[in-house]
Amino acid sequence: MVDADVGAAVGRILHDVLKERLDAAISIDAHFAQGVAERVARFTLDGGKRMRSRFLWWGLQACGGSADAASARAALRLAAGLELIQTCALVHDDVMDASAVRRGRAAVHVDLAAQHGAHDAGTGTSFGTGAAILVGDLALAWADDVVACTELPTDTARDVRALWQAMRSEMVAGQYLDLYGQATGSRSTSLALKTATLKSGLYSVERPLAFGAALAGADQRTTRALCSAGRCAGIAFQLRDDLLGAFGDPGHTGKPSGDDIREGKVTYLLAVARARAQATGSRALLQILDTHVGGGADLTEGDLERVRGALVHSGARDTVETKIRRLLAQSVRHLDRVALVRPAAAQLRELFCTVAGIPAAPVPGSSHEPGGGHTSSPRTSFAEASNG
């Protein structure tokens, strides 16, 4: 049953899809298959929490979507497409940020460079960088293929295509704003939040929920509530990622701590730290931020610790933590407007808490509470399934 392990169910679909694509790649060229296609498959299958897939699935279930085999397969195929587009986003993001590690292993461009040599003398472009861009491109192409080949009712297909097209453009816009903010040295909290929304929040949470609602044929009111809740939770997800980027344990996050500081990214965390330091007239904190943020590979661990201290003493870390909790509460309020199928409502609540990095309390009357069972009512408002 898919409900028992959504990630595993999507993984099985991905395995079949990628095997078919790899066979086609081999027929084109063995070097291409080994260097590019196999990396797409390996990256997509090995690692990741399948969060986007889970949001899609439980969004579908929460809206009372059909449980028949054809509907389930369509949902899992769309989820597989989301996993492939995530591969594209992460591989390209690592290239743009020059990140060496992803999921505790060498990033794709680093791995390619190590295996196939240094710079192309004609262009000055690293082979690893160029080939990794192709890996991301192929993942996006395969994602599009999966969605295009998924059998759906005519009206549903139209809605899904519109959502897919919007999501792809939003992702690119978010990535561009990320680069733009670094290039211009922006210190704007509004730009930081917009970047977080477009780069991660929409395609990580809101759009997967919208796909689930579209597949279920949900009414506009329910769809709007799901999307509003998803946007709040998605922004919280990115803000939590910003905190982990500065303070997280690489052993748990799978990537180095402090990269956002080195790169001078326009994160809400750093923007708030500057704003608060300016508001309080703290020249010492401003000097630390101005001197070290964006310092690149020259920054020492001591420099990073000074910046982390500034993020704490300015109150920025506490401010971001508070905003995450408020966003999570807002997501609950949005979903409280509509009735959702139970126990899918409880699953969504737990997922929202997970991406926000806040432990979920047991849901009264659900199987997630020791000794609890589902009530006879098949639907519940989200407030009933929350701890407020």
Image (cartoon, rainbow, N blue to C red):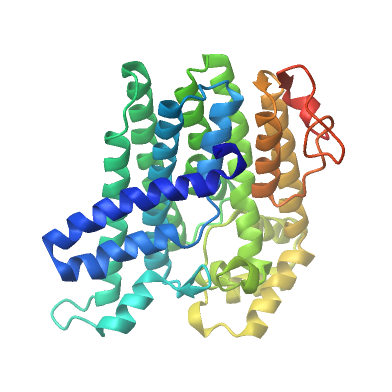
Q: Residue at x 51, y 44 (%)?
A: 52
Q: Position of residue 350 (x, y in %)?
A: 70, 41
Among the 4 quarters of the image, the one containing residue 341: top right
**Nearer the observer, 234 or 63:** 63
Q: Is residue 179 visible?
A: no
Quadrant into which the C terminus falls = top right
Q: Residue at x 61, y 66 (%)?
A: 253
Q: Residue at x 43, y 49 (%)?
A: 12
Q: Position of residue 50 (x, y in %)?
A: 52, 49
**Nearer the observer, 211 or 317:** 211
**Nearer the observer, 259 or 109:** 109
| Number of numbered tags placed on the structure image | 0
Q: Residue at x 55, y 41 (%)?
A: 54
Depicted 18 relative to depicted 42: above or below: above
User: In the rendered view, does 142 fall on the left or right side of 230?
Assistant: left
Q: Residue furthest right?
A: 371
Q: Position of residue 37 (x, y in %)?
A: 26, 62
Among the 4 quarters of the image, the one containing residue 230: top right
Q: Is residue 372 visible?
A: yes
Depicted 355 relative to depicted 156: above or below: below
User: In the rendered view, does 382 fall on the left or right side of 168?
Assistant: right
Q: Position of residue 311 (x, y in %)?
A: 71, 65
